[in-house]
Image (cartoon, helix red, strand yellow):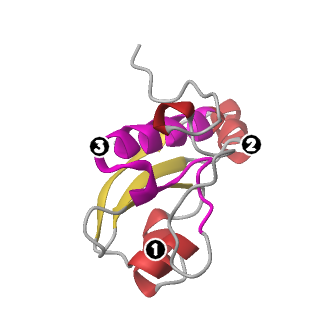
Amino acid sequence: MCIKKTKRQKKYNMIYPPCTLYVVQCRTKGYYYVGTTLRQKHKRFEEHFDGTGCKWTKRHGCRRIVCSFPVPITKASQFENDVWMNYARRFGPTHVRGGDVTIVQRHGNDDIPDWLLPEEFGGKRRVNWGICA
């Protein structure tokens, strides 16, 4: 059965392309990366496995994709921050990157600057991420 898209649906998809939120388990034990992409997800995943996806997966490698799912583009940043917070609570903030916390220091230092680190982890940044409704 073939379902035709209406002109309205086609226009919406052109303005708001599908967005995928995903979590990478790094080769370094206990390290993760949370990301979103508007591109074909398999191409983005391939970049992480090849070491060209981002500085974090270049440094810690890419073991596997833990999960991936579609999210509304208008909520992608919020969801990415929520998932980052969830993983940071479980594995520690220095072991996870993604969302608004993507900074990677030089020389193998995985610390997050105080101005970026949420207060919950001893930083100076006030956030409302990862709050269950």
Residues at discs 2 and 3 in contact (Cβ within 8 Å): no
Q: Could one spot residue 103 in this view of the protein?
A: yes
Residue 90 within the magenta-colored segment of the rendering: yes
Instruction: Tell me what residue is drawn at x 43 percent, y 40 percent.
Output: 83
Residues at discs 1 and 2 in contact (Cβ within 8 Å): no
Instruction: Tell me what residue is drawn at x 53 percent, y 54 percent.
Output: 98
Q: Residue furthest top?
A: 133
Q: How many marks?
A: 3
Q: Position of residue 39 (x, y in %)?
A: 58, 63
Label 2 sits on what residue type?
Answer: Ile
Residue 86 position (above or below residue 66): above
Label 1 sits on what residue type?
Answer: Thr
Q: Position of residue 92 (x, y in %)?
A: 36, 49
Magenta segment range? Answer: 75-104
Rendered image: mark on residue 90: 3
Main SS type for the magenta part? helix
Q: Nearer the viewer, mark 2 or mark 3?
A: 3
Residue 48 position (above or below residue 80): below
Question: Who is closer to the viewer here, 46 or 120?
Answer: 120
Instruction: Report crowding for label 2: few under 14, some 14 to 19, many 20 or more residues within 10 A (C-alpha).
Output: few
Which of the marked residues, 1 or 2, is nearer the chain's N terminus?
2
Rendered image: mark on residue 57: 1
Residue 89 within the magenta-colored segment of the rendering: yes
Rendered image: mark on residue 15: 2
Q: Secondary structure at mark 3?
A: helix
Q: Nearer the viewer, mark 3 or mark 1?
A: 3
Q: Position of residue 127 (x, y in %)?
A: 60, 28
Question: Who is closer to the viewer here, 74 or 3?
Answer: 74
